[in-house]
Image: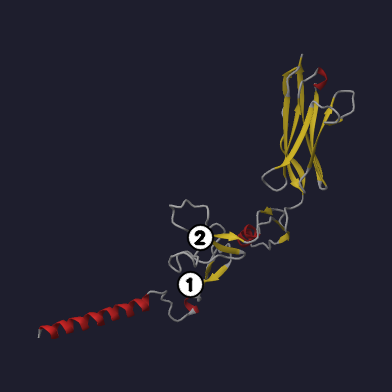
Amino acid sequence: MVAMNASCFLLFGIFYLLDMASGQQQTSGTDCGECDQSSCYPPEECLAGMVKDSCDCCYVCARKEGQLCDHSMLDSDDSAFGKCGENLECRIRTDLDPADPPEATCFCTQTQPHCGSNGVTYENICQLTEARYKLRNGLRAVSREPCRKAPTITSAPQNQRNNTGSYVAMLCEADGWPAPAMKWTAHKPGKASVTLPGTNSRIVVHSRGGSAYGDVTSWLLITHLLEEDDATYTCFAENDMGSASSSAHVYVVL
């Protein structure tokens, strides 16, 4: 009798485990069921386009650039965040601290700037796409580069004052596209302007591009000041779209 009871309990346990396993197999995946598109709600304000949901049935808003997304290599719910939109790719972040849980975000697959038909430069095609869906005014890309524009002086040189034998440094920043060429001139009343540095070894001119497209910074350094350096100095920024300039004076104290 004891052996029979033990056998019964063993069989009961086996059937119970099989039943549990069967139930888990039925509910472990996404419970999609039959697709009834008539029950789908139309998504609104989708700035990265639309994608099918995790059941491949209804359209939902796609994830935008920089938003979290579902990556097949990460252990997460199949529909925890969603799929990336147009020209976007879900990538696992590599800049996290090792102690942080892994996550994936949407990256734009085209990184070059785009000029919009509205004259605005967008960092990439994905940002232009967001603007297109937001504005809904026919915005489109006209070129895969910043919008062409004449230079503007974004940081003008300032007046300087120092003693003879000392030095002065002047800075000038400009932007435009194509990136403007920078030059400096010196002018004294009654005399023609002189392009610097010329043959003067005491004067140094240096220019370099900035962090943004079309940004240029230029420096003018005058060492071992002499009385003759008392003049007006002009920074010029030029490209094939136009030019801009700004002036400042160097006062030499004897």
- Relative height, residue 230 to residue 115 (above, below): above
* Amino acid found under the numbered disc labelled 2: Ala
Which residue occupies 50% across, 63% down?
69
Q: Quadrant of the C terminus?
A: top right
Q: Secondary structure at mark 2?
A: strand
Give how far across and how far down residue 150 sits, in percent. Answer: 78, 46
Q: Nearer the viewer, residue 128 or 135?
A: 128
- Relative height, residue 133 to residue 6 (above, below): above
Identify the residue position indicated by label 1 in the image: 54
Q: Is residue 114 left or right of residue 97?
A: right
Q: Are marks 1 and 2 in contact (CB under 8 Å)?
A: no
Give how far across and how far down residue 25 sits, in percent. Answer: 36, 78
Q: Earlier in the sequence, mark 1 or mark 2?
A: 1
Q: Secondary structure at mark 1?
A: loop
Report the coloring of the rendering. Answer: secondary structure
Give how far across and how far down residue 161 sits, in percent. Answer: 72, 21
* Amino acid found under the numbered disc labelled 1: Ser
- Relative height, residue 132 to residue 231 (above, below): below
Residue 140: name its quadrant.
Answer: bottom right
Residue 49: name its quadrant.
Answer: bottom right
Give how far across and how far down residue 175 sits, in percent. Answer: 73, 43
- Relative height, residue 120 to residue 154 (above, below): below
Q: Which mark is residue 104?
A: 2
